[in-house]
Structures are given as C-alpha cells and as structure tokens.
Image (cartoon, rainbow, N blue to C red):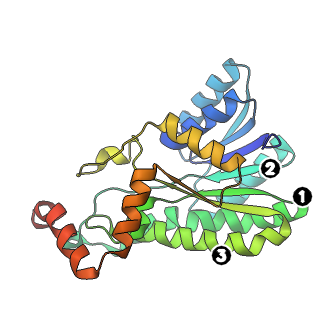
Amino acid sequence: MAGDRNIVIFGCSRGIGRALAEEYARRGARLVLLSRDQDAIAELQRAIEAQGGEAWSRNCDVSDAEDVQAAVSYARECLGGIDVAIVNAGVGGPEWMRDFRASEYRRVMETNTFGIANVLEVLIPVMRAQGGGVIAGVTSIAEVRGFPGSAAYCSSKAAASTLLESARVELRDFGIRVLTVRPGFVRTAMTAKNEFFMPFLMSPARAARIIRRGIERRRRIIAFPWPTVLLSRIVRVLPNALYDFAARRARSENMRS
C-alpha cells in the first residue's frame, strides 16, 4: 500500500534483509535498519543516504528482549510511527543428530522463534496505541517436515509460523496485520552452507521484490517460488514411510559421515 512509508527491518545486514532495505529505499521509504552487525548496517545506511534516501541504523539482537525493546524505542524516535516491521533475522546451517547439542538447538530457537516472539511482545502494544500496522515475520518453506541435517532450523521455523498464525487471527481486530513470509531457496550466506542441491535458487533482490509486493497487498502468506511451494505441499502429505525412505536416500552419505 502507498501508506507503507515508515519501515523497520530486523536482520538487514546481508541477504534478503539487505535486499529488502534497498528495495524499500528505492521506493522512497524511511527506514530503520537493525542487526547484530553494526558495521554492515552503518555501511548500508550510508549507501541509502548517498542515493538521497532516509535511513537510521542501530545494533539489535532479536534474541535479547531488552535489546528489542530499545531498538523499537529508537525506531519510534526516528520515524514517529511504524507502518511495517519486518522480522528477518535468522540463523541456520548443517547440524546432524550424530553430534546433537541441545545448546545449539536452543541458540537457533532463540533467534528464529523467540526473536519473533520478542518483537511481537514489544510491537503489539505500540501498534495498538497507534491504531494499527503490519508485522511480517520471515520463516521458511523448510518448516513442512523435519529434514535431515536441519532439525533445529526446520522446527524453529515451524514454531515461528504457528506463532505468527495465531497472532494473525487475534490481532486483526486491533488493526494489526500479521503476515508470514515463507521463502524457498535464496542465494545468501546462510544457504551457501547447505550441503545439498537447492532447486529454483533465486537472488535476494528478486525475493525482496516478491516480499514487498506481498506486504503491499497484505497477503497473509507470502510463499515463493511457486514450484518449491508446490513441492513442499506434496512433501508435507507424504506418508511417513515414504518420506523417511526419500529423505534417507537424499542425505544418507551426510548422515553416515
């Protein structure tokens, strides 16, 4: 919508988040850039300002509730009101059950799931007070099953999507639109760690355009690309025995090594 002028992006130092900041900046949005990588977002801020845009940046770790509170307060000081908040911060990478560590599982959940929860806790009262707004949480198509080598990532994204769905249903009466962004494979530093073939891999810039259009249209679920979405729906309904067989064949060498 044309009214999406004040944008806050959590996790925009690189990849999809950075591409989203650049996409919105080109369209004249006023941006607050938040990330654990202060140097990267400060450089992004300078690049946006050099092109005549408006941007502010601040260090923020979404897994730290107090940090999120301070970051949202900063964003309100800079922008006045928040039209759209995009929670893109996430971590992941290969992790196998042969070396399972609960501490690593907890670390992924703290960022990918509790990061969104921390933002919701702070933003809900803010957006209720201002009469509404949009919260878009980035999860993943990988939430459909527990893929080998990705237990923490898949379960963290599944939990995040369920959290966002409950929020979407409940918060609409307050004028708050909650959207779930479920990308397929996007060429980022995170996907570069993957040890398997990634079909329909797309650039961050293309993903950002799709997400921005989906937010403008207030689509409840922004899932893409469509071939990967279709494949994920098939995988979701596979009988367990068939899924186990296919997953073991696809990742057997990694599971044994």
Residue 71 in picture, x, y percent from top left: 71, 52
Residue at point 56% right, 40% down?
208
**Residue in front for this viewpoint, 74 or 163:** 163
The residue that label 1 is drawn on is 130
Quarter occupied by the N terminus: top right
The answer to whether any part of residue 34 appears in the image is: no
Q: Categorize mark 1 by other alpha carbons within 10 Å: few (<14), some (14-19), many (20+).
A: some
Q: Secondary structure beneath disc 2?
A: loop
Q: Nearer the viewer, mark 3 or mark 2?
A: 3
Question: Dot 3: few (<14), some (14–19), or many (≥20) neighbours within 10 Å?
Answer: few
| Residue bearing the label numbered 3 | 166
Q: Depth-wise, is mark 1 or mark 3 nearer the camera?
A: 3
Number of other residues with Cα within 10 Å of mark 2, as a class: few under 14, some 14 to 19, many 20 or more? many
Amino acid type at image mark 3: Ser
Residue of label 2:
82
Q: Secondary structure at mark 3?
A: helix
Alpha carbon distance from label 3 to label 2: 21 Å
Comes first in the chain, label 2 or label 1: 2
* Image spot of residue 107 (x, y percent): 43, 65
The quadrant of the rendering that contains the C terminus is: bottom left
